[in-house]
Image (cartoon, rainbow, N blue to C red):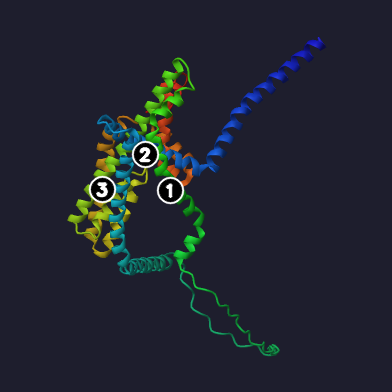
Amino acid sequence: MALITQSGTASSAAKAARDARQLAVPVVAAGVIIAVLYFGRVFFITSIVAVIIAFILEPFVVLLTRIRFPRPLASFVVCTVGLLLLYVVGAGAYAQLAVLIGDLPRYGERIGQIVEGVQHKVDDAEQQTWRLLAPKQLPPQPPQPARAGKRSKTQPPVPAQPAVIPEVRIHEERTPVTDFISANIGSFYQILLTVSFVPFLVYFMLSWHDHINRSFLQFFHGEDRMVAARSLEGVAEMVRAFVVGNFVLGLLLAVSSSIVFWIMRLPYPMLVGPLSGFLSLVPYVGLPLAMVPPLFSALAINRVPVYAGVIGMTGALHLVALNLLYPKVVGSRVHLNPLVVTFSLMLWGFLWDAPGLLLAIPMTAAIKAVCDNVKGLRPIGKFLGD
């Protein structure tokens, strides 16, 4: 009996150790993946941005190849046209910003007046609240005469202390812009590094598209190769639908907002309109962000009806776009439930900051596309979907 008991205890301990190892392996693997994604974020962000842009530009390259353009030449033409369009948009935005920078002192003075007025109102409200809640103070009592028979004790004179000579240090005056640049020089370097590599990566991905696809499919055999091909095509369609759909919707909002702000005679409508339109697409906080540029521009007019009109029109455009247009333009192809979207924004925002917030939904949609095409991962795809 003792031998049977010992063997049973040993088998239970071995089973517990095996279960612990099976549980530890996924946890350790997840930790390693998160660490790699965090410390290699510059590489991953650059690569994913280039892949997304390549997916978007691929139909234009295919269109040129159908009219007898060699694929390298078609890729070069498409990339060049894209860079020229980006330059034109940047030049127009820079022209508007140059004029806005000249008017910044006036806007700064108006903001100072608003802040001072709000501060005065807060102080008045605080004083009124204090008068209502604080008890009435008793009138001051007259000083009591000193009693006879007691002498007041006089304090000995305090010797005079030598005057303290203030220390004067001469230092170079630095502007807030200089402080900001010096504190974030590392981030600026990473952004410049990322932006400089993206055009080259996009060109090589487009020009070597067929070779990359064939080489990637060589890793799979038989039925797995067909699944990999369908998954790759599903990822491309999903990402293209999401990015292009959001861009088209943002463009519609930008044009509509610019026209509305021009009719309202707001300053800089061609700058404020696109900013408000594309900020409106930010998940969850799009509406308050979309109101910031036009309200800032309305400071030059400084009239309550203008502020009310800006808030009303911006809210109306946002609600129409997100409730009527978004489901038809984007939601018909990208099926993600709100809980998964929230968790993906939290995770990728934690790992990659602002770029993670922008790339969270496309990457989650791509993962769902892969899960939908792989038989063993279809339950995960259903869980991610709506």
What is the spatial separation of the Cα atoms under label 2 and label 1, in whole angstroms? 14 Å
What is the spatial separation of the Cα atoms under label 2 and label 3, in whole angstroms? 21 Å
Residue to which mark 3 is pinned: 254
Q: Earlier in the sequence, mark 2 or mark 3?
A: 2
Residue at far right of view: 2
Q: Position of residue 217 (x, y in %)?
A: 45, 23
Q: Residue at x 62, y 26 (%)?
A: 23
Mark 3 lies on a secondary structure that is helix
Nearer the observer: mark 3 or 1; the answer is 1
Nearer the observer: mark 2 or 1; the answer is 1
Relative height, residue 235 to residue 197 (above, below)? above
Circle 2 crowding by C-alpha within 10 Å: few under 14, some 14–19, many from 20: many
> Based on the displayed image, in which of its 4 quarters is residue 6 positioned?
top right
Q: Earlier in the sequence, mark 3 or mark 1?
A: 1
Quadrant assignment for the C terminus? top left
Q: Earlier in the sequence, mark 2 or mark 1?
A: 2
In front: 142, or 198? Answer: 198
Left or right: 157, with 87 as reference point: right
Residues under numbered marks 2 and 3 in contact, where contact means CB atoms less than 8 Å apart = no
Residue to which mark 1 is pinned: 196
Circle 1 crowding by C-alpha within 10 Å: few under 14, some 14–19, many from 20: few
Mark 2 lies on a secondary structure that is helix
Q: Residue at x 30, y 30 (%)?
A: 332
Left or right: 376, with 1 as reference point: left
Checking the image for residue 3, the label placed there is none
Quadrant assignment for the N terminus? top right
The amino acid at mark 3 is Ala
Q: Position of residue 195 (x, y in %)?
A: 42, 48
Q: Position of residue 130 (x, y in %)?
A: 43, 67
In front: 53, or 386? Answer: 53
Residue to which mark 2 is pinned: 53
The amino acid at mark 1 is Ser
